[in-house]
Image (spheres, rainbow, N blue to C red):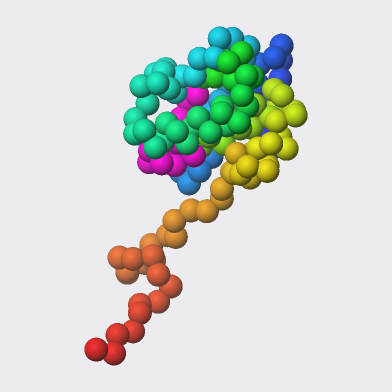
Amino acid sequence: MAEKKQKTKQNIVHVSGKRKRATARVTLKAGKGLVKINNFSLENYKPEVAKLRIQEPLFLAGEISKKIDININVYGGGWNAQADACRTGIGKALSLFQPSLKKTFLDYDRTLLVSDIRHTEASKPNDSKPRKCRQKSYR
């Protein structure tokens, strides 16, 4: 039941990217090079660091990124995890749209195609911090 939704119908690609609690659903189709995140243009996306992280797969794709439109719905997590989820989703979508980009993305950074599974450790009962045991202090 935990299958990935990757549809390619008339050059339309639907994929998802995840990081921590953030999930990004990416739709890619032929177009003019527009990128929208939650119906806002990527040019207006803040903070600047997150915007640059999201643009990494587009820079690696080169001219292909100017011929496609990308629409992203992202929710959950913080701004950094959302940016990484968008980045992974864009990388997956571009590699399905243009299979020759897969090797380029893997050589640059594996997290462009594979979601990072690390999460924060859960808090333990009767304790305010997520450690297995309390640290012992001698002084």
Q: Is residue 60 left or right of residue 126?
A: right
- Does the magenta portion include 127? no
Which quarter of the figure has residue 82? Answer: top left
Along the line of sight, which residue is nearer the eye, 136 or 45?
45
Along the line of sight, which residue is nearer the eye, 33 or 28?
33
Q: Give the range drawn in magenta.
A: 72-84
Along the line of sight, which residue is nearer the eye, 82 or 33?
33
Q: How many numbered markers are drawn?
A: 0
Report whether residue 28 is seen: no
Relative to 22, residue 36 above or below: above
- Does the magenta portion include 74? yes
Report the quarter where the N terminus lies. top right
Q: Where is residue 76 in the image (x, y as percent from the top left)?
A: 42, 37
Instruction: Residue at 40%, 70% (x, y): give it.
Output: 131
Instruction: Residue at 68%, 42% (x, y): give it.
Output: 106
Relative to 64, residue 132 above or below: below
Q: Where is residue 45 in the image (x, y as percent from the top left)?
A: 37, 26
